[in-house]
Image (cartoon, rainbow, N blue to C red):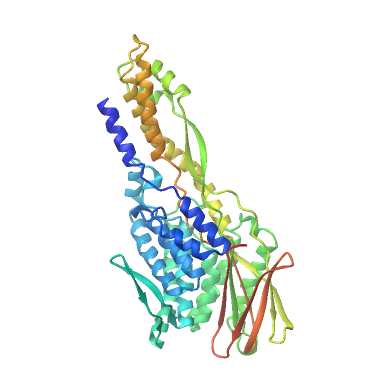
Amino acid sequence: MRRAGGIFIVLLLSACGHTGLNHAQFVDAVRRGDMQTAYALTEDDDFYKDDASLLVRYLELGSYHYLNGEYFQALQNFDAAHGLSKQLYTKSVSKAAAAQIAGDGVIPYAGEKYELSLLRFYLSVTNYRLYRQGFYEAYAAEKDGVKQAVERKELSESEKRRHLSAARAALLDWNALLTAFTVESNNKNDFHQDMLAKTWGGEFHDIYGSNGDRQIARQLYKDAVNLLESDYADMPSLQDENGEKLKEYAREKSADLTADGAKKKNVRFLVKAGLVTPKIAEKVDFQIPLAMFLAANSGNDLTSCLGYILPGQRIAFEIPSVPEPPKAKGYRLKIFDSKGKQIATRPLVLTAPVSETAYKAYKNKRAGMIASKGARLTAKYVSAVATACAAYDSQNSWTILAAYGIFATLAKGIEASEYADVRYWGLLPAAVYQQSVPLKKGDYSAQIEANSQAVKNFSFTVDDSRAVLVDLNLPNE
C-alpha cells in the first residue's frame, strides 16, 4: 500500500496543469472584436501564467496588442517569446525525458515549428510598423504589482532606423531557423520551409532597397515558385488556381524589383484573415500487450487479477489533434480614388495557408504521438497493475475489491496527468494574403470582397517618398 501511495502522489504532482477554458474564450472574444473582454481574460491565473506555458502567453499577448495597433507592447511580448523559445528549443532532450514522468500538458511548451517560424514573421512586421509609425504608444506597465502609466514616446530618426534594421534582422534569423529545421529533419514531410518567409522576405528586402537586398528578394521569389512543387505541393488551397496566382505573383514581383517611377508597385497589401484552426483533444484506444504485465511478475496470480481490473488490457488516452480545415477563402481587392472612382481591382494572393500547415504538421506526427504516449502509459499502467495486484490473493475472493480500489485510484491519477496538450498560438491567422499595386500620390479608399460581398472597407494615403504597407487583419473571417 505504501508503494501505491507513493505512485499516486507523483501522479497528482504531475497533474497540475490548467483547463485552457480561458484561452478558448479569449480567442472567441478576439474573433468577435470584443478586445476588452479578451484582455480581461488574460489577467486570470488560468491564462497560461504557469512557467510551463509562458511561451503561449507571450505569443497571444503579442498578437493581441498587434491586432489592437499597439505595436510597442506587441514587440515586447514577441521579443520575450523569441528569447524563451530559443531557450526551450535547446532543451528538447530534457523536455522529452520529463514527459516520461509528467504528462505532455505540464512540461514547458516549446511551440510548434510553424509557430516558431511565424514568430519571426511577426517580429519583422512589428518592427517595420514601429519604424513607419515613429512612436511608442502610451501604456500601463506593472512594477512590483503596481501599474504605472508610461507616456507615448516619439522616436528619433536613429531609433526608427534601428527598428527598420531589426525588421531585416528578423528575416535573417528566420532563414537560419528554417535552415536548422531542414538540417535536423529526417522526414521530408516535417515542416522546414515557410512560403511566407519567401514572399514577405522578398517584399521587405525590396522595401529595404539596397542592391544586395533586391538580389536576395529575386532569389526568394524563385524559391517561392519552387516550394509550390515541393513542400507546398500537397496543400489543398494551392493545388488549384491559387497556386497559379502565386506563381504569377512571384514572377511579377521579381520583375518589379527593377521597376521605377510610376511603374513601381509601391503599395503593398498584407492581409491576415481568419484564425488558425484550434487544437482539440482526440481520443485514442490502445491495447497493452499481456507480456508487458507478465514481465512485471508481482508474485501473485497476475493474469487473473488483470482480467478483473483491466479487461483486455485496453486503455484510452487523448492526444492533441488539428481538424482538417476548409480550403482558404478567395478575396478580391478593389481600390478607389478620392472621388470614389474604381481605379484598380486585383485578387489577393494566398501566400500562407496557415491552418493547412498546422493540419499537415499534426498528420505527420500523429502516429509518433500515439506510439510515444502509448509506451509511456504502458509503463505507468503496468506499474499500477503490479501495485494493485500485490493486494490480490487468489484464495480470497474479497481481495479483488482491494486490488480494484487501488488500481482505480492510480488509474485516475494517470488520467489526470495525461490529458492532451492542446496549448497553441490561437491568434495566428488562418491564412495570409498579399498583393501589390502601383499608385500615384494621393488619398484612396479600398474594399476587400469575398464571394462578391464586402468584408472590409478602409482608406490609406500614398506619399511620394516611401513604399506604403497596408497591413490588415480580419480575424472574424
| Occupied quadrant, residue 355 | bottom right
Q: Is residue 37 above or below residue 97?
A: below
Q: How far from the left and from the top, in percent, is residue 30?
A: 53, 62
Looking at the image, residue 98 sits to the left or right of residue 340; the answer is left
Q: How far from the left and from the top, in percent, is residue 222?
A: 57, 70
Query: Residue pushed farthest top?
Result: 395
Which quarter of the rendered picture does the N terminus lie within? top left
**How many badges with numbers are in the image?**
0
Name the residue: 41% across, 56% down.
44
| Occupied quadrant, residue 228 | bottom right
Looking at the image, residue 169 sits to the left or right of residue 255; the answer is left
Question: Is residue 116 visible to the viewer in this orientation of the structure?
Answer: no
Q: How far from the left and from the top, in percent, is residue 196?
A: 54, 66
Which quarter of the rendered picture does the C terminus lie within? bottom right
Q: Is residue 372 above or below residue 234?
A: above
Question: Is residue 30 visible to the viewer in this orientation of the structure?
Answer: yes
Looking at the image, residue 291 sits to the left or right of residue 222; the answer is left
Q: How far from the left and from the top, in percent, is residue 344?
A: 71, 79
In front here: 299 or 477? 477
| Occupied quadrant, residue 137 | bottom left
Q: Is residue 188 above or below residue 287?
A: below
Query: Residue pushed farthest left?
Result: 2
In front here: 80 or 466? 80
